[in-house]
Amino acid sequence: MKVADRSVDGFLKRPDAKVRAVLFYGADHGLMRERATQLARTVVADLSDPFRVVELNAKTVREDPARLADEAAAIAFTGGRKIVWIKDAGDGVADATRALLEQPGWDALVIVEGPELASRSKLVELFGDDDGAAAIACYPDREAAIERVVDETLAKHGLDIQPDALAFLSEHLGGDRAVTRAEAEKLALYCAGQKTVTKADAMAAVGDSAAVGFDDAIAGAFEGDLVRMSRALGRLQGEGVAPVAVLITAQKHAQRLQVVVSAVAAGGQPASVIRSLRPPIYFEAATSMERQARRWGPGHVARAIALLTEADLRCRTTGSPAQAILGQALLAISGLVRRP
């Protein structure tokens, strides 16, 4: 079965008793590992226990399919239910997994992580169609999920956060759940001794690391600055940021730009229109947005949104290299810019 996103939290806390194998797949590797770990701890409290937690790599499973079945059926030396964990799975393990699901008499919980697997891959379809298995998608956080992670993390440290600070973070975080949580922890450390996190705190603590790469890549594309765009994409790739996260942020940016250029086309002044946006845009981004507002028209922004939407869909469904899809989309957008 496929677990709907709204049902994931409940499933991870109280897994369906008939489910013996769970696949986590998608572009957000941090979220994937967080969810897989949460599920594993419902079976084994100490995940370093070598008798109850067995890790297999995909190559081993492909070359020796019986190994997976043997490990799933073996009784732990110290007693208790076992976990068999495959952390780098692709469609190459589908046959071995199918054979295991068809075989009765094993009690282990099999956890499979499939980084970058498309939703139509053989492995995802296998887990989604089997009543004894579950498939859980792990894609970069949208705004509401980002805000929830930040709120939860700060609350553990006794901190509240002002709405404009939360808006800033939701706009600049979300490429990876682990990165979002780490940045929120860093922000909590920065604000130690305070009761409330302000926007200035958020910008000072995470703006330099979380926002700059995204902003440079997107602003470079929408201003036609290919050097800036390429350098930023290279930096984001080196940091392991999921390409889909950049696309989501670029879509949000394009939607806001569309509001601005439509107002400008109706006679508004770029600077005043940008100042009226809510949540507000901080000053460096506002300056870039103003430049863009003078060089884009509503029709071209609509085309940019279509390019980003198509790229997002391709990343999630086709199995093509996501980094290449992202680069092609931003390059195409840079070609739409009216030169000064």
Image (cartoon, helix red, strand yellow):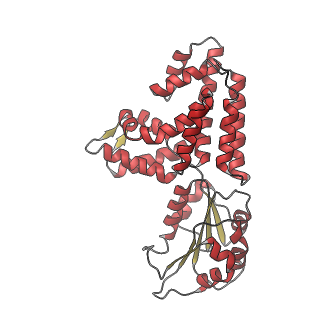
Residue 75 x, y percent position in the rendering: 54, 87
Say which of 63 and 285 sits in front.
63
Residue 167 x, y percent position in the rendering: 47, 36
Instruction: Say whether residue 190 is visible.
Output: yes
Instruction: Say whether residue 281 is visible.
Output: no
- Left or right of 15 in this view: 314: right
Quadrant of residue 78 in the image? bottom left
Q: Residue at x 72, y 41 (%)?
A: 310
Q: Work out which quarter of the rendered image holds the N terminus and state it.
A: bottom right
Q: Residue furthest left?
A: 193
267 vs 187: above or below:
above
Q: Residue at x 53, y 35 (%)?
A: 215
Residue 49 x, y percent position in the rendering: 44, 78
Q: Residue furthest front?
A: 227
287 vs 166: above or below:
above
Say which of 171 and 136 sits in front.
171
Quadrant of residue 207 in the image? top left
Say which of 227 and 134 sits in front.
227
Q: Residue furthest top?
A: 267
Residue 187 x, y percent position in the rendering: 36, 44
Q: Residue at x 55, y 20 (%)?
A: 290
Quadrant of residue 110 in the image? bottom right
Q: What is the total number of numbered labels drawn onto the structure image?
A: 0
Q: Work out which quarter of the rendered image holds the C terminus and state it.
A: top right
Q: Residue at x 66, y 30 (%)?
A: 334
232 vs 34: above or below:
above
